[in-house]
Image (spheres, rainbow, N blue to C red):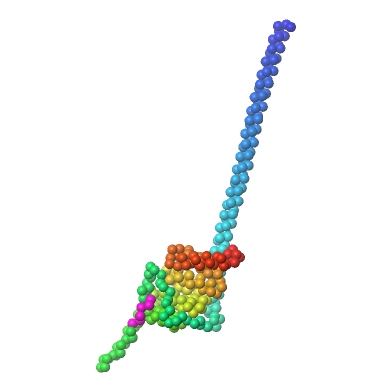
Amino acid sequence: MTTSRIYYTLIMLVLAALSSGCTAGIQGKVDTQEEAIREMRDSITTLRKSQADLASEIDEIKQGLQTMQGTIEHNSMKTERALATLKQREEQPGALTNQVQPAGPPGTPATPVPAGGAPGAGTEGVAAPAPYPPPLPGQTPQPPPQPTAEWTYAEAYNTFKAGRYEAAREQFKKFLQLYKTSDLADNAQFWIGESYFKEKKHEEAIIAFEELIKNYPKGNKVAEAYYKQALSFIAINDPAAAKARLEMLLNEYPSGDFAGAAKQKLQELQQQVPAEEQQ
């Protein structure tokens, strides 16, 4: 073999070796890139699934909020319809029952005034002043003094305490005609509703308490009026309206004197109201 031929053979062997090494290196890089692409695709798939799950959870939350809002609106509408119906009945003579249930014994205590005191709270139960004394012989008769708001209110309240609810109701109505701007006006309206409640005239009681809530929203008897409305709705077999009234009480007076009783009554109603009424 000639020298040139030996050189040629060696050169071809070197080129073959180099070519084999480059091919292996290139193939390794390709494999690495393909593995990276697969991992990236898996990450994208996982991310898309997480986004889909998150979107589903958000939709469920939105649906729950819509359901809750619908329940509140449904209960409010039922309450408004019930009040409108009762108001219409009251305006139609003879539509409501006029039968008076037996009243409690004389001296039945009235509902206590919530602690914290409100204007006029201290006048409840105070004895009315004695009648104006007659003139002595030889004296010129003097016209009796005009009764004050406190005197008129105390007289009506004492009548209520004596169990004469219809008479007390008329006295409180007269008081409101004479002293509708008095600090005692909201209390007088409350006792009108309470007199109906004592006689078990629950529909009239609901309307009377509603007058208090509408006309005296800042009065000290509003929370109790809500509570007595709820009890009246329960008495006329409308637990959904009662539930709405208790929820309004707790929303406006979450730490008031009637909050505990309202929560307990609401729990009882949750177990009694049919599922379709709660939706």
Left or right of 18 in this view: 120: left
**Is residue 250 among the parts visible in the rendering?**
yes
Task: Count numbered badges in the picture.
Answer: 0
Corner quadrant of residue 117: bottom left
Residue 41 colored magenta?
no
Corner quadrant of residue 82: bottom right
Could you say which is closer to the camera, residue 160 or residue 46? Answer: 160
Residue at 60% of width from left, 45% of height from top?
50
Among all residues in the image, which is located at the extreme bottom? 138
Could you say which is closer to the camera, residue 127 or residue 220? Answer: 127
Q: Position of residue 180 (x, y in %)?
A: 41, 76
Corner quadrant of residue 130: bottom left
**Is residue 92 among the parts visible in the rendering?**
no
Residue at 54% of width from left, 81% of height from top?
97
Quarter placement of the C terminus: bottom right
Could you say which is closer to the camera, residue 239 or residue 64? Answer: 239
Magenta region: 124-129
Residue at 64% of width from left, 24% of height from top?
25
**Residue 37 in the image: above or below residue 201:** above
